[in-house]
Image (spheres, grey):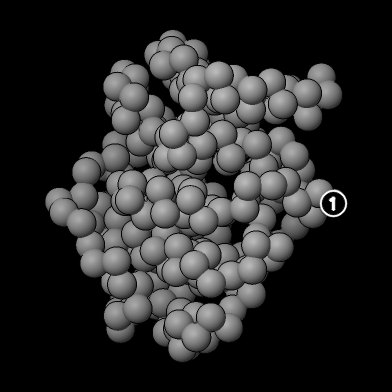
Amino acid sequence: MAPEHLPIHIRNALKENRDVLPRALAGQLSFRGMLAFCGNFRIAGIATLFLTGLPEGFHRHLHCSGRAFLYYLQQAPEDALRTSQALPFFDALGAGDFDGAAGIARRSRRTWAQDVEYEEDFLFVEFLMQHFFLDASPAQGEALLERYEKALQGAEDIRLELCRALLRSHEESFNESLERFLAERRDRMEELSEGRTVADELLATEWSFSVEGLALVRLAERKSIPTEVEYLHVPSIARQRPPGPLPEDAWTRPLED
């Protein structure tokens, strides 16, 4: 995607959020509606990073995604929630907003929503929330991963190896698993794009940047696991620490591109 299109994607994403903001504040968005609202912040953040080569705007927009989602969780009915789809949890981590991520973890649904999400997808996010933010013991972490393995029914899922590496603080296993996770993500997206129409704003942003990958690196750093300088779709510039905390209600302020 040509760089000159990035300002257009930023403007469109933030304009849509400006239009939707009153409904978000009034608690009138559905779960999918809030995910779309947060997704616009993610698009604007990645596009800003690609456009400027600087992390400040990127972190600000991801912070807004996480905090908007946390606001939603404080009033949303539990049966509407899908823990496996809580992408703003990863946005908060990517922004270095660990307090926001902890809030999301505390208010997320603790049960698997059968028939609407895969159990292994639920357990991947649930393990990260429990292990890093909800004071799960090592034994509880192991139990979650045993359940994860059973849910796979013999299928392979590199995310399980990532979780094991994080639980055990194993440097080599973490880095190898993350590299495979990111490579498989690239291959999966390339397959999805064959013969399908993919939105230009996604091709220009999330297709070449993994917020989940960045979040996993942040979590590894919290456990003092040595990491590589660069990973596929996780550029080192995005890993810089934000200079200071942003206001919790930054997402409610007038949104400018």
Q: Residues within 10 Å of mark 1 (few under 14, many from 20)?
A: few
Relative to residue 90, is residue 37 depicted above or below?
A: below
Relative to residue 39, is residue 90 depicted above or below?
A: above
The residue lying at 64 percent from left, 27 percent from top is 144
The residue lying at 43 percent from left, 12 percent from top is 170
The residue lying at 49 percent from left, 24 percent from top is 137
Q: Is residue 19 left or right of residue 3?
A: right
Labels in figure, total: 1
The percent coordinates of residue 156 (x first, y second) are 73, 22
Foreground pick, 142 / 207: 142
Question: Could you say which quadrant of the image residue 108 lies in?
Answer: bottom right
Residue 142 seen in the current view: yes
- Secondary element at image label 1: loop
The residue lying at 62 percent from left, 53 percent from top is 109
Foreground pick, 1 / 11: 11
Relative to residue 204, is residue 186 depicted above or below?
A: above
The percent coordinates of residue 121 (x first, y second) are 68, 40
User: Which residue does the numbered mark 1 point to in the structure image?
Assistant: 115
Residue 183 seen in the current view: no
Quarter of the figure that contains the C terminus: bottom left
The percent coordinates of residue 193 (x first, y second) are 69, 51
The percent coordinates of residue 41 (x first, y second) are 43, 66
Foreground pick, 187 / 130: 130
Q: Is residue 252 left or right of residue 114?
A: left
Name the amino acid, label 1: Asp
